[in-house]
Amino acid sequence: MSEEGEKAEGVEEDEFRHIVRILDTDLDGNRRVAYSLCGIKGIGRRVARTVVITAGIDPNAKMGYLSNSDVEKLKTAVSGVEKRLPWWMLNRRKDLISGEDKHIMGSDMALKFRDDINLLRKIRSYRGIRHERGLRVRGQRTKSTGRRGMVVGVVRKKILAKTGGGKRDGAS
């Protein structure tokens, strides 16, 4: 009886996949399905749970133990996520170019983000100019924060005197 149990466990270990590939992203097989889908850019916990439930898969199952047919169901569910989600859950509503409601995922997200910033630069909007200059865009204060790349703080006179930086040429 113990040999049969070992064989059954061996079969499960052979079927277990540590990495499941969906939408050109490697997903962790040790995590639950709903949380593993969060590894895809553009899919958060709420969207992942909705997609998994509408695909008819247990959200608490481990991703590595899913059968090939279940993984295919997930792939089709993720590719058709715009039809499965209500309009208010989509991450790109009323697209500037097409005017449609879309849900962008994966590498397309970075491309669209870069295109949006380039459009803001091109039309010379305030946000685009702030992006160009590398400054804060969303109204944060900049007097005392966001100082990257330069010396921060006040140098005291005593420290300058010790190093000789406080003396002027010709003055004694």
Image (spheres, helix red, strand yellow):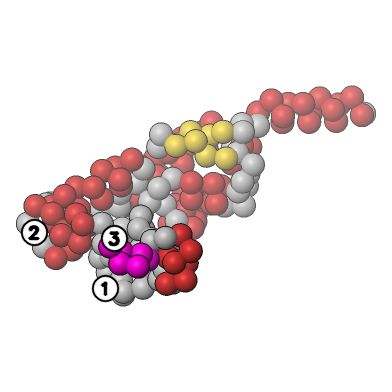
Left or right of 14, for residue 9: right
Residue extent of the magenta highlight: 166-172
Q: Position of residue 138 (x, y in %)?
A: 27, 69
Q: Secondary structure at mark 3?
A: loop
| Distance in Å between CA atoms under marks 3 and 1 | 44 Å
Left or right of 88, for residue 3: right
Image point 7% across, 57% down: which residue?
123
Question: Could you tell me which quadrant the C terminus lies in?
Answer: bottom left
Q: Position of residue 135 (x, y in %)?
A: 26, 62
Q: Secondary structure at mark 1?
A: loop
Most common secondary structure along the magenta stretch: loop
Image point 28% across, 62% down: which residue?
170
Label 3 vs 1, first from the N-terminus:
1
Left or right of 120, for residue 15: right
Local packing at callout 1 (Cα closer than 10 Å; few below 14, some 14-19, many 20+) is: few
In front: label 3 or label 2: 3
Mark seen at residue 139? 1
Residue type, numbered disc 1? Gly
Residue type, numbered disc 2? Arg
In front: label 3 or label 1: 3
Label 3 vs 2, first from the N-terminus:
2
Circle 2 sits on which residue? Answer: 124
